[in-house]
Amino acid sequence: MVLYKRVWVFKDEKFSKTGWNVKTKKVKIDFEPWSRVLLYMHLVREGDPWDRVCGVFVNGVEVLRGITPHEAWRTHEIYFVEDITEYAKLLSGEVEVGAYVTTYVGAWRVSVWIDFALPLKGFEVCYPIVHNVFSREHVEDASWHEKEVKIRNLGWLRIFASGHSSAEGKFLGKNMVIDLELVKGSEKESITVIYHHEPYIFGRLVPSYYIIPQKLKEVDKIRFRIREAVKYIKTTITAFELPFRITPPPSPTPTVTPTPSITPTPPIKYLAVKKSKIEIKTKSI
């Protein structure tokens, strides 16, 4: 029995002087449903000594962002693994998967693949609707950025934010304050996010933050600002619309068998599983 399937996107692909450009490939995903989706990214250094931002897109939505280690740490390759099950709605049919490494000298060898864990048969799988609100939005000051959306039942938001600070080195390495506003007509919900950045020491995933609204579920506009941006910050905000559940199907209605006037000695019953079918066998005593 096959428990998972693997789809390769890039195999040892060379990324040279690509900057923030995204290199894309189309893959065919003609099987579903699945209970879990894991994304892998493997990078090998080829002559680029610097720490670089890297990431993966699925149908134009950024789902992973990482930072490679500096050559000073004597590390020439790195793996990133991300659970992207919440993006499963995008992973059906012909899918465009993109990857990027912000390299300007030398090159990196990049491999990207996706593993799909298949659920038990007979289970209903429902995925959230994915709204790509802001995609690597370029932020240089504390002004507001806004987008109109149509979300009827907002479940949560996911935020990536990383950038460059001329004062403190690459990728900030400090906390940021992000103000969010969810708007529906004259109603508004304000959320303040303290985006924590650990000091950059080694290659790692850029932290992403999840925000669950407490007041508004129906939203027609999303706004955000970053109170301080020393040089620039690339910000991605994705909204997920419910429902999202994995539930068993309803139990069949039991049949009622009339009780005979004389009950014989009941046989012993046991179950035998064969080729995904359940057979009831009897053995007389």
Image: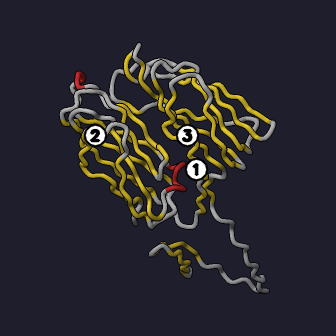
Number of the label disc, if any, that sits on residue 74 = none
Judged from this view, the residue extending furthest toward the right is 186
Query: What secondary structure is marked by label 3?
Result: strand
Number of the label disc, if any, that sits on residue 43 = 2
Q: Earlier in the sequence, mark 2 or mark 1?
A: 2
Residue 169, quarter of picture: top left
The amino acid at mark 3 is Phe
- Looking at the picture, how far across and down is residue 31, in whole percent? 46, 66
Q: Distance between the residues labelled 2 and 3?
A: 26 Å
Residue 21, quarter of picture: top left
Residue in the image at 54% along x and 21% along y: 176
Number of the label disc, if any, that sits on residue 130 = 1
Query: What secondary structure is marked by label 2?
Result: strand
The amino acid at mark 2 is Leu
In the figure, 54 relative to 1: above or below?
above
Q: How crowded is mark 1: few (under 14 residues within 10 Å), some or many (20 or more)?
A: some
The residue to which callout 3 is attached is: 134
- Looking at the picture, how far across and down is residue 186, in whole percent? 81, 36
Residue 219, quarter of picture: top right
Q: How far apart are marks 1 and 3 (CA)?
A: 12 Å
- Looking at the picture, how far across and down is residue 54, in whole percent? 36, 37
Image-based side of 174 in relation to 201, left or right: right
Q: Are marks 2 and 1 in contact (CB under 8 Å)?
A: no
